[in-house]
């Protein structure tokens, strides 16, 4: 390994630390701020926490879109969403079964399924196979508008809080929120640049590196948040964080990416987008079954993600 690639690897590791710590500051401070508005754990998980933990995907994808690295821009979103439902939700359930609810299934889960199907239609058209020659800024604006409408709906029809948060928001909460955002944006920029260098050196395509290594790195905040929430019995945050994060990725990140840099869609992403639809459908079934995601169901989700990783690298 030459010196430049060694430095690239070190910077990738440092960028993951920046993403993790930055998201930690962002989520903690945002939760204090949100709880001061007296909303439920599920709504917090779907909105403020999901936005905080999705910030790395925002940073990586928008940076990639701005520099015309299309495979990383789209691949990171799709890969992160599969990773969220596979490794993170599945891994969290393996550690501790997660309680779900009818509202989580009927409102948020079904909206995620509809959103994922819409992405598939925008990318592959009516025949469901031929890539769209141009993912337009108008389509990006449509996705972003749906996100704004969804967030407004959640806060207008907000669920009552299960309990009052022990910590009130302070001036330091807002300082940490801004510091976390800066760390995440900087870490995302460094990851795109140096992970791409490592991928080319290894002879791995940008698409594969996007849906595996970069996706895992940017999903680290979701994992820490969901595991911690589940262990503390805050299941609304544990699952709401992941559903909300996937929605923010699909509607917010892909929406902004399309607005910034309209692009053509590669046939390479067909399998991953199709797998994401299946993963969302399977997750909904698990949420509905006994209103709990069991350890066995978590193991199934993790196994699917491992198999998918194997075929990504084998391909």
Image (tube, rainbow, N blue to C red):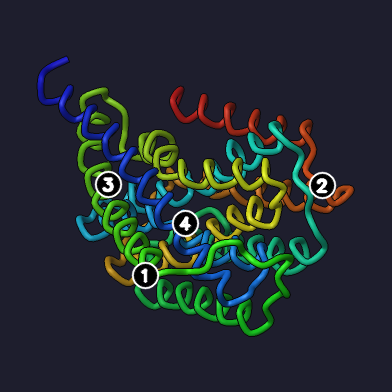
Tell me the SS state at disc 1. Answer: helix
**Which quarter of the figure has residue 67?**
bottom left
Between disc 2 and disc 1, the foreground one is 1
Residue 314 x, y percent position in the rendering: 46, 22
Tell me the SS state at disc 2. Answer: strand
Which residue is under mark 3? 187
Farthest residue toward the right?
Answer: 290
Circle 2/circle 1 CB separation < 8 Å: no
Mark 2 or 1, nearer chain start: 1
Mark 2 or 4, nearer chain start: 4
Between disc 3 and disc 1, the foreground one is 1
How far separated are the C-alphas under marks 4 and 3?
16 Å
Between disc 1 and disc 4, the foreground one is 1
Tell me the SS state at disc 3. Answer: helix
Could you tell me if residue 92 is visible in this image?
A: yes
How far separated are the C-alphas under marks 1 and 4?
15 Å
Q: Is residue 92 left or right of residue 135?
A: right
How far separated are the C-alphas under marks 2 and 4?
25 Å
Residue at x-position 83% and y-position 53%? 288
Numbered tag placed on residue 27 in the rendering: 4
Which residue is under mark 2? 292
Residue 10 x, y percent position in the rendering: 22, 28
Which residue is under mark 1? 171
Tell me the SS state at disc 4. Answer: helix
Residue 296 x, y percent position in the rendering: 78, 31
Circle 3/circle 1 CB separation < 8 Å: no
Mark 1 or 4, nearer chain start: 4
- Determine crowd level at label 1: few under 14, some 14-19, many 20+ residues with C-alpha closer than 10 A: few
């Amino acid at each position: 390994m030459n010196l430049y690639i060694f430095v690239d690897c070190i910077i990738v590791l440092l960028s993951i630390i920046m993403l993790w710590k930055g998201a930690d500051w962002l989520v903690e401070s945002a939760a204090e701020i949100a709880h001061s508005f007296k909303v439920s754990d599920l709504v917090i998980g779907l909105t403020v926490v999901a936005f905080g933990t999705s910030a790395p995907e925002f940073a990586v994808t928008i940076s990639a879109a701005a520099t015309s690295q299309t495979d990383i821009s789209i691949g990171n979103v799709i890969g992160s969403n599969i990773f969220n439902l596979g490794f993170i939700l599945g891994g969290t359930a393996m550690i501790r079964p997660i309680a779900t609810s009818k509202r989580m299934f009927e409102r948020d889960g079904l909206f995620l399924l509809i959103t994922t199907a819409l992405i598939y239609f925008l990318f592959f058209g009516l025949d469901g196979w031929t890539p769209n020659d141009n993912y337009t800024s108008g389509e990006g604006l449509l996705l972003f508008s749906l996100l704004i409408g969804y967030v407004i709906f959640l806060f207008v029809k907000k669920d009552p809080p299960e309990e009052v948060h022990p910590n009130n928001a302070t001036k330091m909460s807002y300082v940490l929120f801004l510091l976390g955002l800066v760390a995440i944006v900087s870490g995302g920029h460094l990851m795109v640049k140096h992970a791409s260098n490592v991928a080319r050196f290894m002879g791995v395509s940008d698409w594969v590196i996007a849906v595996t290594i970069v996706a895992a790195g940017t999903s680290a905040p979701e994992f820490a948040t969901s595991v911690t929430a589940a262990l503390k019995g805050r299941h609304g945050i544990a699952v709401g964080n992941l559903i909300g994060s996937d929605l923010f990725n699909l509607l917010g990140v892909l929406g902004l990416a399309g607005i910034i840099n309209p692009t053509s869609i590669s046939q390479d992403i067909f399998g991953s987008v199709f797998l994401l639809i299946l993963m969302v459908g399977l997750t909904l079934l698990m949420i509905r079954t006994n209103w709990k995601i069991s350890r066995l169901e978590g193991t199934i989700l993790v196994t699917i993600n491992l198999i998918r990783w194997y075929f990504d690298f084998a391909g």
